[in-house]
Image (cartoon, rainbow, N blue to C red):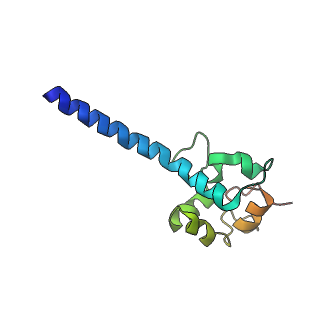
Amino acid sequence: MVRTGIGIAVAFALILIAAAAFALPNDLTVFKTAYNPKEGTALASAACLTCHAKMPPTKDLNPYGKDFMGKGRNAAALKAIESLDSDKDGFSNIAEINAGTLPGDPASKPK
């Protein structure tokens, strides 16, 4: 009886961990659906670095990721931060996205 309870608790914990692991790729899907980054650009190959400060992705977000998180982590949040310059490099987020550069990295900017 006790083993069954422990087994159920372990199974439940694994389900929660799996759900958390699949949450972040959804953010990238939302981004790619909204903007469809052009192949061959830094943005198209950035994957998790679009919002995260380093790989493998940790909880450390870059400025763009922080702005996205602060607005709700959905398609509306992406639209809400388009006019911002999250990385303070002189280009709006949408200008960087359109150019294929990273809106959260001040070293990556349109030419």
- Residue 29 horizontal side relative to residue 5, left or right: right
- From where the camera sits, is residue 60 visible? no
- Residue 88 horizontal side relative to residue 16, left or right: right
Q: Quadrant of residue 98?
A: bottom right
Q: Nearer the viewer, residue 4 or 44?
A: 4
Q: Residue at x 73, y 58 (%)?
A: 106
- Quick check: 92 above or below 11? below
Residue 57, x across and y down, in percent: 57, 43
- Quick check: 5 above or below 68? above
* Quadrant in which the C terminus appears: bottom right
- From where the camera sits, is residue 87 visible? yes
Residue 68, x across and y down, in percent: 57, 62
Furthest residue in direction right, as rendered: 111
- Quick check: 63 above or below 58? below
Residue 9, x across and y down, in percent: 25, 36
Furthest residue in direction front, as rendered: 33
Q: What number of labels is visible?
A: 0
- Residue 70 horizontal side relative to residue 54, left or right: left
- Quick check: 96 above or below 57? below
Furthest residue in direction left, as rendered: 1
Residue 69, x across and y down, in percent: 52, 61
* Quadrant in which the N terminus appears: top left
Q: Residue at x 60, y 72 (%)?
A: 80
Q: Residue at x 52, y 61 (%)?
A: 73
